[in-house]
């Protein structure tokens, strides 16, 4: 199997997206464009808590590129499937 297809099921780049690239990365995995771990109060990504005008805490993943790295795919799947056990 050609190297470029070996991990194709866990990585793709959408060069046609009007927001591409959304992070300052040379290669970005668009598979988790909207992070499936956003709902977690603690995740392996680089997030911060910001306070809205009405005092609510909101998770900001603006500076997080962790789910967009191909090597994060396995960890994301592991975290998501752990909740279904």
Image (tube, rainbow, N blue to C red):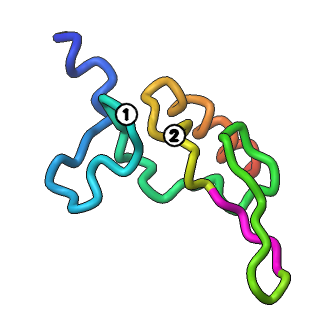
Few, some or many residues within 10 Å of mark 2 (<14, 14–19, 20+): some
x and y, in percent, of residue 33 in the image? 42, 54
x and y, in percent, of residue 48 in the image? 74, 53
Q: CA distance from mark 1 to mark 2?
A: 8 Å
Q: Is residue 63 above or below residue 29?
A: below
SS under mark 1: loop
- Discs 1, 2 touching: Cβ within 8 Å: yes
Question: Residue pushed farthest front?
Answer: 53
Numbered circle sitting on residue 3: none
The image quarter containing residue 39 is: bottom right
Q: Which residues are magenta?
A: 56-60
The foreground one among 67 and 83 is: 67
Question: Residue pushed farthest right?
Answer: 55
Q: Is residue 59 magenta?
A: yes
Few, some or many residues within 10 Å of mark 1 (<14, 14–19, 20+): few
* Residue drawn at (43%, 28%) of the image: 70
Q: Is residue 12 above or below residue 31?
A: above
Q: Which residue is disc 2 drawn over?
A: 65
Q: Which residue is disc 1 drawn over?
A: 25
The quarter in which the N terminus is drawn is top left
* Residue drawn at (28%, 59%) of the image: 19
* Residue drawn at (25%, 41%) of the image: 13
SS under mark 2: loop
The image quarter containing residue 77 is: top right
- Mark 1 or mark 2: which comes first in sequence? 1
Q: Is residue 47 above or below residue 71?
A: below
Q: Is residue 72 left or right of residue 54?
A: left
* Residue drawn at (23%, 11%) of the image: 3
x and y, in percent, of residue 71 in the image? 49, 24
């Amino acid at each position: 199997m050609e190297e470029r297809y070996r991990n194709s099921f866990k990585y793709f780049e959408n060069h046609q997206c009007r927001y591409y690239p959304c992070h300052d990365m040379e290669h970005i995995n668009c598979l988790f464009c909207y992070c499936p771990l956003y709902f977690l109060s603690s995740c392996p990504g680089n997030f911060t808590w910001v306070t809205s005008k009405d005092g609510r805490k909101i998770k900001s993943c603006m500076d997080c590129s962790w789910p967009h790295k191909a090597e994060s795919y396995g960890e994301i799947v592991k975290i998501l499937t752990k909740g279904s056990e």
